[in-house]
Amino acid sequence: MGKTNWKTRAVTAAVMTGLMGFAAHAEDQSKQEKHEMKQGKAVGEAAARRVQYVGKLAVFNNRQIKLARLAEQQATDPQVKQFATKLREDHENSQSQLRDWAQQKKMEISALSDSNVTSEDQTGTGGSGVQEGYQEKMKGSGEKLGKAIDKSNEEITKLQSKEGPEFDKAFLTRIAEDQKKGKDILKEGRKEYKNDASFLALLSDTERTVSGNETQAKELEKQMKKQ
């Protein structure tokens, strides 16, 4: 009788030990899953920030291209027309490089196309928590981008209503201010993505071009005021 009880107690103890081990394993697994989910969300959020930043830079390039095209048509001063052509070519080149980079990264940025669609996407986004983090961070970004595009179009329409020297001066003032804002956008990117060599090189090249255009716009603006 005592021997039977001993066997029963031994079996019971073994079962309890197994259950405790299973519970501990389940708890460890749960912690691991939560950790992976947290890491995944962080990756998704970082991807969303990159898409948003590239979209912002693309909108800046598009704005300069549209302003330059307008000045090529409406500017009366030959130097202003010449500058407008250079400005357009510079930003078309910047946009082309940005588009190529985004395609390599499998990013779909609406502002890099001729479409007015404001939705953004990054193909291939997945994994534990990655999609969730990406989608949460991207909420409202399409609307924000759309508002930026609308504001830009309104300012271009306002500039379009000016004529002669008044247009030339207003154009140069607008460009000088825009290029300064562009430098701020590029500095932000260089700081955020300093460990991404290819993207950093692209941003640095664009920043040098933008800085040069800002200087030229201000010099032409001074000349126009003396006239």
Image: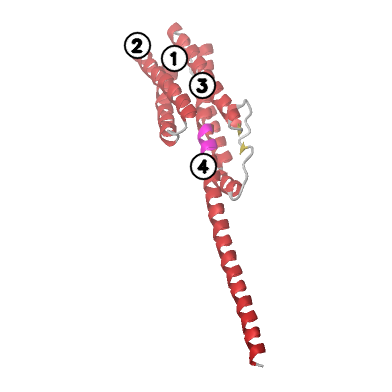
Q: Position of residue 12 (x, y in %)?
A: 63, 81
Distance (Cα) linking label 3 and label 1: 24 Å
What type is the residue that disc 4 sits on?
A: Ala
Can the viewer see residue 215 in this picture? Answer: yes
**Residue receiving disc 1:** 168
**Residue receiving disc 4:** 46
- In primary-sequence order, the first of circles 4 and 1 is 4
Which of the two discs, 2 and 3, sits closer to the camera? 3
Can the viewer see residue 160 in this picture? Answer: no
Which of the two discs, 2 and 4, sits closer to the camera? 4
What is the span of residues highlighted in magenta in the rendered image? 49-54
What type is the residue that disc 3 sits on?
A: Ser
Which picture quadrant has residue 11?
bottom right
The structure's colour scheme is secondary structure
Q: Which mark is residue 223?
A: 2
- In primary-sequence order, the first of circles 2 and 1 is 1
Q: Nearer the viewer, residue 29 or 197?
A: 29
> Does the stretch in magenta take in 52?
yes
Whether pointer 2 and pointer 3 mark residues with C-beta atoms closer than 8 Å, the reply is no
Kindly give the residue lying farthest to the bottom in the view shown: 1
Q: Secondary structure at mark 1?
A: helix
85 on left or right of 219:
right
Q: Position of residue 80 (x, y in %)?
A: 44, 11
Which of the two discs, 3 and 4, sits closer to the camera? 4
**Residue receiving disc 3:** 94
